[in-house]
Image: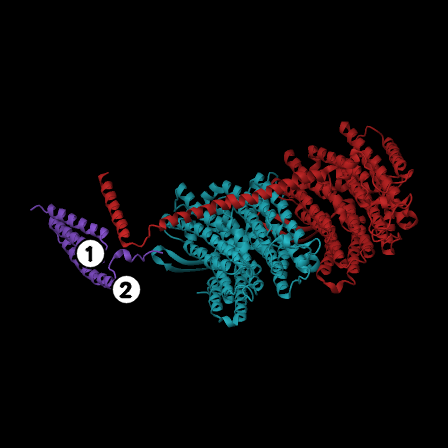
Amino acid sequence: MNPVNYLYLSALLFTIGATGVLIRRNAIVVFMCIELMLNACNLAFVTFSRMHGNLDGQVIAFFTMVVAAAEVVVGLAIIVSLFRSRHSASVDDASLMKL
Amino acid sequence: MENLIALLVAAPLLGAVVLLCGGRRLDAVGHWIGTILSSASFVIGVVLFTDLLGKNAEHRTLMQHLWTWVPVEGFQADVTFRLDQLSMTFVLLITGVGSLIHLYSVGYMEHDERRRRFFGYLNLFLAAMLILVLADNYLLLYVGWEGVGLASYLLIGFWQHKPSAATAAKKAFLVNRVGDMGLSIAIMLMFTTFGTFAFGPVLSHVGDASEGKLTGIALMLLLAACGKSAQVPLQSWLGDAMEGPTPVSALIHAATMVTAGVYLIVRSGAIFNAAPDAQLVVTVVGAVTLLFGAIVGCAKDDIKKALAGSTMSQIGYMVLAAGLGPIGYVFAIMHLVTHGFFKAGLFLGAGSVMHGMNDEVDMRKYGGLRKYMPVTFITFGLGYLAIIGFPGLSGFFSKDKIIEAAFAKGGTEGWILGGAALLGAAITAFYMTRVMLMTFFGEKRWQPDENGNEPHPHESPKTMTIPMIVLAFGSVFAGGIFGIGDRFLHWLEPITGHEEGNSPVSALTVTLATMVVLVIGVGIAWAQYGRKPVPAVAPRGSLLTRAARRDLLQDDFNHVVLVRGGEHLTRSLVYVDHTLVDGVVNGTAASMGGLSGRLRKLQNGYARSYAVSMFGGAAILVAATLLMRAV
Amino acid sequence: MSFPLLTATAALPALGAVATAAVPAARRTAAKWLALLVSLATLALGITILVRFDPGGDRYQLTESHPWIADFGVRYELGVDGIAVALIGLTALLIPFVILAGWHDADPLETGNKRWRPTQGFFALILAVEAMVIISFEATDVFLFYIFFEAMLIPMYFLIGGFGDSAHEHGDEAAATQRSYAAVKFLLYNLVGGLIMLAAVIGLYVVAGNFSLADIAQARADGTLHMATNTERWLFLGFFFAFAVKAPLWPLHTWLPNAMGEATAPVAVLITAVVDKVGTFAMLRFCLQLFPNASKWATPVILVLAVISIIYGALLAVGQRDIKRLVAYASISHFGFIVLGIFAMTSQGQSGATLYMVNHGISTAALMLVAGFLISRRGSRLIADYGGVQKVAPVLAGTFLIGGLATLSLPGLAPFVSEFLVLVGTFSRYPAIGIIATFGIVLAALYTLVLYQRTMTGPVKPEVASMPDLRPRELLVVAPLIVLLIFLGVYPKPITDIVNPAVKQTMSDVHKKDPKPSVEAAK
């Protein structure tokens, strides 16, 4: 099978993720969309690894997974504490990052 | 002997320092300290003079090197004093007349609570003036030059609680500064031309320099002389300078400081001799000023201002003589010295009159004072006879020689200059007779003032009359001592050089012509002020009279062109600085502020909008990378 | 290894600043005395430098060199030439007077708004400025110089913005607004200048590979370091711009009147007499040495700017209604003279300019500090609010007059010597510019005497009728300055002897010789 198709899939997944980040308000959904984007990248890395015949891409994919796992821990903690203090998981409610 | 020269300067300088820093505990004796120190300087001067007389003419130059003043690569200025016949003459005049006027001031300033300070300033003046005439290079001369300007500033404004005095002092300093600019440019030109500005090297190498440069130097020196000596066009300050106490007017603004310009020209004679164009300008300035001052002197009712006009005019004679070159240098200095005697005497006389008249200066409120103050009358009268050139008195010898020299210039110039000098002599006779008649003759015209205080004219105390008597002696005999047998000529000739010139008219003719114009001048004045009573209020007068009362409109011109123009210029510059120069900066700051205010709106705090910009940025980066690769 | 004298001279006031700041608020008088003692000790070290310096010796003496940021070739390199010695002497000399004059300027306010004023902070900041200025004069490493050239802005900013005239302190908030405007303006102007200089410093490193002034100058002189014409010009402009802001040169001058007007008189003296001198000093040391060709290339424009500064500053001084702003504009005029002397590229001009920096420091300090005493008595900076002071406070008026006469360069006082040297040095190469600059002396007389006349003479105004004369502390500040002005006016040799060899070096750096007179009369 032509590996390029995997790349198309990866691009598709990334776009879905990005769109989700931009248009959804629920923090959990946004968060999951980010995960989707990361995994789309992982798919691309693995595909490239296969295409080039070396292991660099797979190594990076492992890295990404580790980072993503760490990110899940921190990110979920932030979302939970945000929900606790504001009783809402909407990202638009927490527009505190301005002067 | 030469080690004494510095003491000449040191004595009055010490006096100035002690008196000005000494504080009130010296109030009781301050005036005597000042007088003694200036007399000490005079005594040293006399000692040095006898020493010089004992030497051959070639060995009469003493030098004293004190210290190196400004040692910079290629530039050497030393504090060195030079005492030769020319500076010796000045030293005696300055310290002699200066000491007399110190003595006079003891009486004149008796009731002034700041008398100590007054004497401090007088001593400061003497020191500066002595530096001026003793300096061996132009830069040190400059120190004295501005030093006397400072002393003059302080003394004109001595009664500075009067706004008019403070303004007059400022004006004198400023006008002099314009002249000083000339002096400093002259020194710079000398430096670039000769690489030095010491008298010896410069004056002995004049022959090697181009005439253009020499003319430039000479004209700049003339500008300096015009400022200090109140010559047209920088004469406007002298009349106002009469705001100062009268001894100051006598010492600084008649006898010594204002003649510094003549000294400068005569001292730089070698430069002027090599720059005939500049010499012509000097003579023109002298001739114009001698008429200008004389005309102003005719119209003033203020006795001191009339005398100030006369001073201007007499210095005009000296400058004219100095412009004639070697024909006239000696006579310029001779007239300077005799003028120093009689004009100082006249001013002291005027001061004595004012002292007796409750400081009234308007001659129309005098009249018949000869009965009340006989000593003043006689000494003033002798000074009067001397200045108009009465045969046998000082002015006769010196002024007559200048008129002769002017004719001796030869050609059309000689006739014009000589004619101007003769005309000046006639006007001099007129205005001085006028002053004499209005003050001492006729009926008394003074009235009680608004508080009912009527002046009680009385003779002044001894400290004031003695200097007047001494100066009167000088006014009578100095000319004869100098002129008969050409003693003065032989004394100064080694320094200034001398030529006879070729006069189209004989000396006797000139003397006779001078006598004739003298009689005419006196006659007209007598017809106008002696035969009929003087009105107590000035008549309106002709256009010329009215202009002359306003100093021939010089001040009005200055006011309109310089003062108003300057005010507008500074005001508009202040505006420009605030709006334009600062405005550009503030404008930049404001637009930066506006821009950042707008950019700030992008930071709205919504995570999703930040995400959009991140994606957008990433997209642009990717696009740019692809594009670069494609190209 | 010998005693690091230069480091000690800079470190002493720096440590003193820390110590002064650490004094508890309750003992503020102790802080003042501590600061004064430290500044006097620094003066002693400054005099030691003066004594140890051998005018006939090497160009840079008392040198110290240690590696600092080795990766970038930045070294902690100190050394002084004659010009630096003179200016270090000036700085060390003036600071005790500044401290003494500002003795009560930072005392807590009793009335009005009870804004907190840290007395110790005031004196600590002054010492901090002194330390940084001194090390700027000593640094022979371009990067080291740059750091302190910029860092001195920080204490200056707080001094200008934090401590206003007591005259205005009791007033409304408008005064405080004005003051913070002035402080921010000061900071921004100088930061922009410094930023551009930073670019040029980096550029210099790229071209030359290190920051050592001596090494680069040496490499330039023997041709091992070649700079393209354009590169040199850009680098020169980068340096010059920063120095011209600091100096300040027209049209980059507008921060100075604001800063000097709003700051207290001692701080104003610190600005114009000490901090600004770093700008003109750096022109001599860095612009001319590192970029001789570009300096010559830019000379015509710089001379014109300098002449404009002279005339423009003087004219604006005439038009001022505020005493301190008047002095500020007069300083702009004087800085024009200094720049003129530096870029006339003659021995007389450069010696004169160096001397001018010293003399201007002393004369402006005298005039400004007396003006400060005057202002503190009446509580107003406006000239129109005074009149007849001479009658009630003759000593104050007399010292004010002497300060003024020094400002107008009266012969016999120190500034005359330097001004004349600058003029003559300029005139011998550029006669027209020399003559225009000479007009400055007439204008100087105008603004000084008008100021004196309006404030000191005339009838006594009722508001000044009870004005006390100078107090002993104030007289102690002014009298030594006046004595120095007279002494250096009569005998400037001690300074010229130190400065002359350094100027000779600089002249050879730019490959210039003095114009020869057309007639050899001097021999």
Q: Which chain is cyan?
A: C
For marks 2 and 1, the one nearer the N-term is 1
Residue C347 in view (yes/no): no
Check residue A29 in the rendering and tell me which mark sits there, or answer none. Answer: 1
In the rendered image, residues at marks 2 and 1 fall on the same chain: yes
Where in the figure is residue C252, as x and y percent of width and height? 49, 47
What is the secondary structure assignment of the residue under circle 1? helix
Where in the figure is residue B172, as x and y percent of width and height? 71, 46
Amino acid type shown at disc 2 = Ser
How packed mark 1 is, by other alpha carbons closer than 10 Å (few <14, some 14-19, many 20 or more), is some
Q: Which chain is red?
A: B
Q: Would residue B70 be found to the left or right of residue C392 on screen? A: left
In the image, is residue B623 above or below residue C404? above
How packed mark 2 is, by other alpha carbons closer than 10 Å (few <14, some 14-19, many 20 or more), is few
Q: Which chain is purple?
A: A
Residues B364 and C422: in front is B364
Q: Quadrant of residue B270?
A: top right
Amino acid type shown at disc 1 = Val
